[in-house]
Amino acid sequence: MSERLEDIAIAMVADGKGLLAADESTSTIKKRFDTIGLESTETSRRDYREMLFRADEAMKKYISGVILFEETLFQKAADGTPFVDLIKAAGSIPGIKVDVGAKPMAAFPGETITEGLDGMRERLANYYKAGARFAKWRGVIAIADGLPTWGSIKANSQALARYAALCQEAGIVPIVEPEVLMDGAPGTHDIARCAEVTEWVLRTVFTDLYDARVKLEGMILKPNMVIDGKNARKASIEQVAAETVRVLKATVPSAVPGIAFLSGGQSTEEATAHLSAMNSGYDLPWKLTYSYGRALQDTALKAWAGRSENVAAGQRAFTHRSRMNSLAATGAWKQDLEKAA
Ligand code: 5MM
């Protein structure tokens, strides 16, 4: 019997758990490996992901699901165990990134449109067979002088809605990720501008999801936090939390079971502090948790540095960050826990 979308979605945002975004495409993981001077090959990518997925405590206690890149979904650990089996054995859910990337949008200079809808029904059937029970699609919205435009917001929003409808048809929970960039060029906008654009984008996305007949109970939203641009960071933790909650309450129906944030280039500790602040002191209709890529992986990647003798150190770093974010997901994180570690 196939699982209900609602149940999968609820499991993805279970108390004190969140998602590990490990779906870096080949070009993005190369950039990450460049920072530790490691060549990106199928084997080095496997070794890195295996280190994360075998971090037992983190995976069992803090990670509800892992977003994978297609290569990783079908990849095996060094001993031949499929990664999907490793993830499932830890009680976590395998997921798959199904978009094929944000591409320059014709006639919209400086903006992108995410591609990947063609042939998606067939691909989803294969991913389901391989064990994926949720998927992810990311639309990217940049803030700059005169940007974003309505044309690009609408096109990205409609693509997200089409993708979500196809996922639900396939028995797969869609993670709907409309990312308003904090670290796009020039990254000098203030928090008020981010709030205005995020609200505009989310209103559009939920209208398109309704028009596409997407069942809100069987999806997860993955938004940016409302924060000022990376090159103009000023807003306090409390301000980011308050503005993010305000915009989400104004736009996200309570039928959505959970919201799992992206970290978007925030420092690892900032991403944790913001999440914890939102989970303490606000009355919220949905779960708020993490679906972090960089904010869960950065310290682990550095500790590992591509060396087999550092696997345990990398796993310790990943476990620590996962535990801190797990505490943040229930509003129980405190800064001195970082120092203690
Ligand atoms: C892990 O990075 C994801 C895929 O990026 P590319 O398609 O560009 O390789 C990305 O979508 C990620 O899942 C989200 O942005 C969340 O990651 P961060 O690092 O922002 O938390």
Image (cartoon, rainbow, N blue to C red):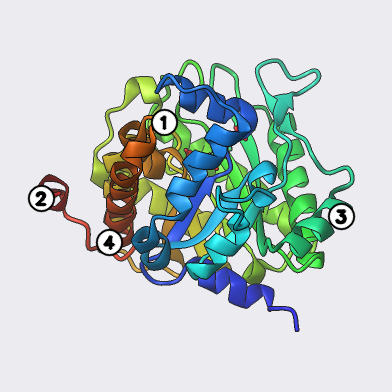
Q: CA distance from mark 1 to mark 3?
A: 37 Å
Q: Which mark is residue 340?
A: 2
* Side of 333 where 56 appears, left or right: right
Q: Position of residue 26 (x, y in %)?
A: 63, 30
**What amino acid is found at the position of numbered circle 3 in the picture?**
Arg
Q: Which mark is residue 327?
A: 4
Which type of secondary structure does the marked residue at label 4 adopt?
helix
Q: Tell me what residue is drawn at x 88 percent, y 54 percent.
A: 122
Q: Which mark is residue 306?
A: 1
Q: Nearer the viewer, residue 320 or 138?
A: 320
Mark 3 vs mark 2: which is more N-terminal? 3
Which type of secondary structure does the marked residue at label 3 adopt?
helix
Q: Which mark is residue 121?
A: 3
Q: Position of residue 216 (x, y in %)?
A: 65, 67
Q: CA distance from mark 4 to mark 2?
A: 15 Å
Q: Nearer the viewer, residue 336 or 220?
A: 336
Which type of secondary structure does the marked residue at label 1 adopt?
loop
Q: Tell me what residue is drawn at x 80 percent, y 51 percent.
A: 162
Mark 4 vs mark 3: which is more N-terminal? 3
